[in-house]
Image: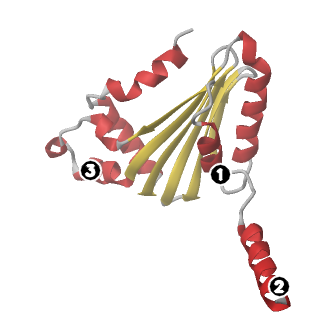
């Protein structure tokens, strides 16, 4: 009896101890995607509506390295400024983790954006764009893929310019952009 209680207690301890309680961007997305002040979108590559026969080999490679995009936006207004500051601080804390390597940062005190990535220079698994504007809120965009690199991202931008984006997938963001 004592042996089975010990084994049960040890199993419970190992199970609880193996849970990772560190904050992560993925956990943040999951925890907040259904909350009222947040807008969450998952966007697939088919949003681009590009004709694959008209793409160069480099453009096809860039498009194939892109798996999906997750967007989480917080809509700020006069009534939730304290919550805006709290949520913004949470995201900034998560992005301070050394796994997020900052590429660039721009903007001023109340407006600004940063671009970070996870992975190595030639095998990027995730690009993260964090943009904030005190009057309207903030958005965190995760561009997920395999074997992405800065050249793929630049090439993907050129594909974006020539695409016929399916605006229906972006409908939920309209309410954030409206002031």
Q: In the rendered view of the protein, which quadrant contains the N terminus? A: bottom right
Of the two numbered discs 3 and 2 in the rendering, the one whose residue sits closer to the viewer: 2
> Which mark identifies residue 100?
1
* Lower position in the chain sequence, tag 1 or tag 2: 2
Q: Residue at x 64, y 42 (%)?
A: 31
The residue closer to the viewer here, 170 or 52, is 170
- What is the crowding at mark 1: few (fewer than 14 residues within 10 Å), some, or many (at least 20)? some
The residue closer to the viewer here, 87 or 120, is 87
Q: Position of residue 100 (x, y in %)?
A: 65, 51
Alpha carbon separation for disc pair 1 and 3: 27 Å
Alpha carbon separation for disc pair 1 and 2: 41 Å
Q: In the rendered view of the protein, which quadrant contains the C terminus? A: top right
* Lower position in the chain sequence, tag 1 or tag 3: 3
> Which mark identifies residue 60?
3
| Residue pointed to by mark 2 | 6
Q: Position of residue 71 (x, y in %)?
A: 52, 36
Please say which color scheme the image uses. Answer: secondary structure
The residue closer to the viewer here, 98 or 69, is 69
């Amino acid at each position: 009896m004592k042996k089975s209680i010990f084994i049960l207690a040890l199993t419970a301890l190992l199970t609880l101890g193996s849970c990772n309680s560190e904050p992560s961007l993925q956990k943040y997305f999951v925890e907040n995607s259904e909350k009222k002040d947040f807008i969450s979108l998952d966007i697939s590559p088919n949003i681009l509506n590009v004709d694959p026969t008209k793409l160069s080999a480099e453009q096809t490679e860039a498009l194939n390295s892109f798996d999906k995009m997750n967007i989480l936006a917080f809509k700020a207004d006069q009534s939730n400024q304290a919550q805006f500051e709290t949520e913004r601080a949470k995201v900034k804390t998560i992005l301070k983790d050394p796994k997020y390597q900052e590429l660039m940062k721009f903007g001023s005190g109340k407006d600004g954006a940063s671009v970070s990535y996870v992975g190595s220079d030639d095998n990027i698994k995730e690009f993260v764009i964090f943009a904030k504007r005190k009057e309207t809120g903030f958005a965190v965009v995760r561009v997920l893929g395999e074997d992405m690199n800065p050249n793929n991202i630049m090439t993907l931008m050129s594909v974006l310019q020539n695409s016929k984006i399916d605006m229906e997938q972006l409908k939920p963001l309209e309410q954030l952009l409206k002031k």
